[in-house]
Each structure stands twice: as C-alpha cells, then as structure tokens.
Image: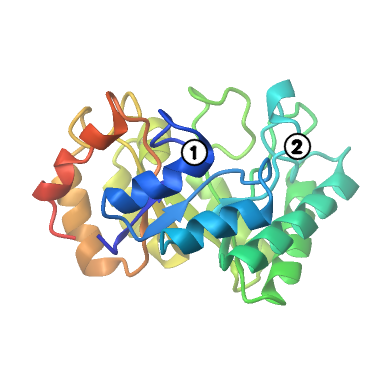
Amino acid sequence: MDKFSINLSTVFTEVSFLERFKEAKEAGFDYVECQFPYTYTIEEIKKELNQNQLSMELINLPPGHWEKGDRGLAADPNRIEEFRKSVEMGIVYANSLGVKKIHCMASKHPDSSLEVLKKNLLYAGTEMSKHGMTLLIEPINTFDMPGYFLNDIRKASDIIHQVGLPNVKLQFDFYHIERIHGQSLSIFQTYAGLVAHVQFADCPGRHEPGTGEMDYKEIFCYLQKYYKGRIGMEYVPQGRSAESFAWLKEVAL
C-alpha cells in the first residue's frame, strides 16, 4: 500500500492522536499524513514514527486559532507577521519529521485579499525552497467550510502561475473538487501538471470510497497510470476506521 498515506487527523479517531500511528502500521500502512501536528512536540511524534517505522508525507501550516474559527492566515491582511511565524514553525516541524510537503490554508476572514495571499505564498515558498520543501495550496468547498477564500481550482491555478515559484504546487482533493465543480477526474486531467499531492474521500459524505457517488475504480485506475505521488486518505470513516478499508481490495494500487 505504498501508494497511499493515511491521514491521522480523520482516520483512527477512535483513539488518541499518538495512538493512531500504531493503528496505521497494524493496518498495513507505511506512510501517514496529518493536518496540524502542533499540539504535540516534535519528539512525541518522531517517537511514534520511529517505533512504527512510518514516514510522514504531509502536514499543514498552523491555521491560526482553529477553535475560534480561523481556517488559515495566508490571505488575511491583518495577520501577515503571524503568518510568517507559522511558516517558521511549519518548517521546523517538517524538517524534524522528514516532511517535504506543507499545505497552506488561505483564510475565511471577510477581509481576505488575493494580493496578500500571493505575497505570502511567495514568502513561504521562498523560505521552503531553502529546505527542499514543496508548498501546497488547495481549493476547499464552501459547503464544508463556508466563506473559505480559495474555493475554485481556476483561481488556485492562476495564483500558482502568478507566484511563479517551482515549489508552489496544487493539492488536489477529489472530494473537494467534486463538491465545488463536479467531474473531478476530468478536472484532474486538466490540472495534473500543477499537482504535487492528491487526497480523496467519496462524495457526498466525505467517507471512504464506495459510500458515495464517485467512481473510484476509474479514478484510481487513472492515477495508477499517470500520477506518481502518494494519495492521501483524508476521509472520515462511516463506521469504525479498521472496517473502512474494504475498498482497497478492489483497486490495483
């Protein structure tokens, strides 16, 4: 199952975050990812990675105060210094944990600015390039995240081209793109040259493949042929996490 990285922020939530590493290994995975590791020390996370012989594929930058409604800082004109500090923290965690991909959330603040977002991405991408890291941006649907600033793949593509750094790329989540635009596989084919990380969940519901309306056999068949990176399992299991992997037997990855 080397093609997949399992997202420990959404799967195995029956146990504490640090216990999820062992669960992932016992389920047969070698790669994990997570959204926000910053509640835990680098040493705590590194211990779990090492003990369970796992590699961390992806983390997010700190998003601000999630519990107060923040969904990223990069487009907020009032928090540029805080954003820069979040970049510094993200790089420290990523370097220590062997992570080469960092997702940067935009913001859902009503004052969000496209120009601020582009300037912040230029700063973050430049800093991450010094460490051989890729900065990712991702369109997120406004059904799940009302008011999120970056909610269209065309806008994301334009931003990447305008920032103009080779290490600023697209995180393509089939679930979000399906909710936003529909026809997610066709859209992936259009933007594949910008994609550095893929995630998925079925739509609607955001559960594992087979619980919604998407043809994941077709999607995974295409990804097997034309996408070389890992695929992040960022779904919310419909039942128990350990019982949510039956679909893996049906895909040749």
Q: Note whether residue 34 is visible.
A: yes
Kindly identify the amino acid type of the residue bearing the numbered disc 1.
Ser
Secondary structure state at the residue bearing disc 2: loop
Give how far across and how far down residue 7 sits, in percent.
43, 45
Residue 130 has which mark? none
Give how far across and how far down residue 61 sits, in percent.
67, 50
Q: Is residue 114 left or right of residue 99?
A: right
Which residue does the image show at 53% across and 26% down from the upper left?
A: 142
Q: Quadrant of residue 228?
A: bottom left
Residue linked to disc 2: 64
Furthest residue to the left? 250
Q: Nearer the viewer, residue 248 or 159?
A: 248
Q: Is residue 170 left or right of residue 191?
A: right
Which residue does the image show at 21% across and 64% down from the upper left?
A: 224
- If the image is split into quadrants, where does the C terminus sit? bottom left
Task: State which mark lies toward you, 2 or 1.
Answer: 1
Q: Earlier in the sequence, mark 2 or mark 1?
A: 1
Give how far across and how far down residue 243 sits, in percent.
21, 33
How far apart marks 2 and 1 lie (CA) works out to 17 Å
Residue 9 has which mark? 1
Classify mark 1: residues with Cα within 10 Å, few (<14), some (14-19) or many (20+): some
Secondary structure state at the residue bearing disc 1: loop
The count of marks equals 2
Q: Note whether residue 232 is visible.
A: no
Q: Quadrant of residue 36?
A: top right
Kindly identify the amino acid type of the residue bearing the numbered disc 2.
Gly
